[in-house]
Image: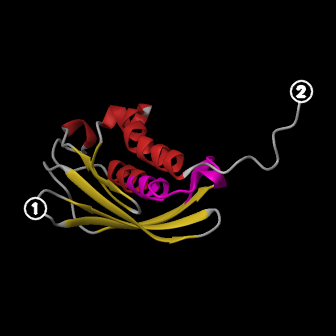
């Protein structure tokens, strides 16, 4: 068995873009996100919008979203923003390092629309800012996330 090439050829610009674009197709098919039924309204470099259609299964009482569902959507949108402009030559192992959430209002009987943008990219750490809105464009929650891809 041979060791992996320590200096693999860098990916072409086209391959980098193909992989970034594939993330938007992959995220909604992962088991948890598929269960929730998320979809992308926008997927651009460092700027994404993810939508969770309203379903009373994700609520506390049939109307108001459970905070854990809101946090999951914030985390997912932040991760998508991190991947949306990622340099795949730097690696593909990823995880959320930290996320702070501020709940601002209750979202009820409304789709949850979550916008995430990349604030800064380091060597392995990506910092995102994320805001969740309801259908009336009211801010529901805000988060700062540190995401790692290496």
- Tell me the CA gap for discs 1 and 2: 59 Å
In the rendered picture of this protein, how many numbered marks are placed on residues? 2
Q: Residues within 10 Å of mark 1 (few under 14, many from 20)?
A: few
User: Which residue is at 40% across, 60% downward?
Assistant: 45
> Whole-percent x and y of residue 147?
54, 59
Q: Quadrant of the N terminus?
A: top right
The stretch of residues the image draws in magenta is: 77-97
> Whole-percent x and y of residue 120?
51, 72
User: Which residue is at 24% across, 36% downward?
Assistant: 57
Along the viewing direction, whichever of 53 and 91 lies nearer the viewer: 91
Q: Earlier in the sequence, mark 1 or mark 2?
A: 2
Q: Disc number at residue 1?
A: 2
Give the color scheme: rainbow, by chain, secondary structure or one colour.
secondary structure
Judging by the rendered image, the residue that carries numbered circle 1 is: 136
In the rendered image, which quarter is residue 131 located in? bottom left
Whether 74 is drawn above or below 21: the answer is below
User: Which residue is at 27% across, 69% downward?
Assistant: 104
Q: Disc number at residue 31?
A: none
Give the structural element (helix, strand or loop) at label 2. Answer: loop
Give the structural element (helix, strand or loop) at label 1. Answer: loop
> Whole-percent x and y of residue 6?
82, 47
Q: Is residue 12 left or right of residue 135?
A: right
């Amino acid at each position: 068995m041979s060791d992996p090439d320590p200096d693999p050829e860098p990916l072409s610009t086209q391959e980098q873009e193909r992989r970034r674009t594939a993330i938007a197709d992959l995220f909604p098919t992962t088991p948890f996100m598929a269960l929730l039924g998320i979809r992308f309204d926008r997927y651009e470099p460092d700027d994404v919008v993810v939508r969770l259609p309203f379903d009373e299964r994700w609520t506390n009482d049939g109307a108001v979203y459970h905070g854990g569902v809101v946090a999951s959507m914030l985390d997912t949108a932040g991760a998508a923003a991190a991947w949306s402009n990622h340099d795949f030559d730097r690696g593909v192992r990823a995880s959320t390092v930290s996320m702070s959430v501020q709940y601002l209002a209750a979202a009820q009987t409304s789709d949850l629309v979550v916008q995430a943008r990349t604030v800064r990219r380091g060597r392995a750490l990506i910092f995102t800012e994320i805001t969740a809105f309801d259908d009336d464009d009211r801010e529901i929650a805000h988060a700062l996330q540190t995401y790692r891809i290496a």
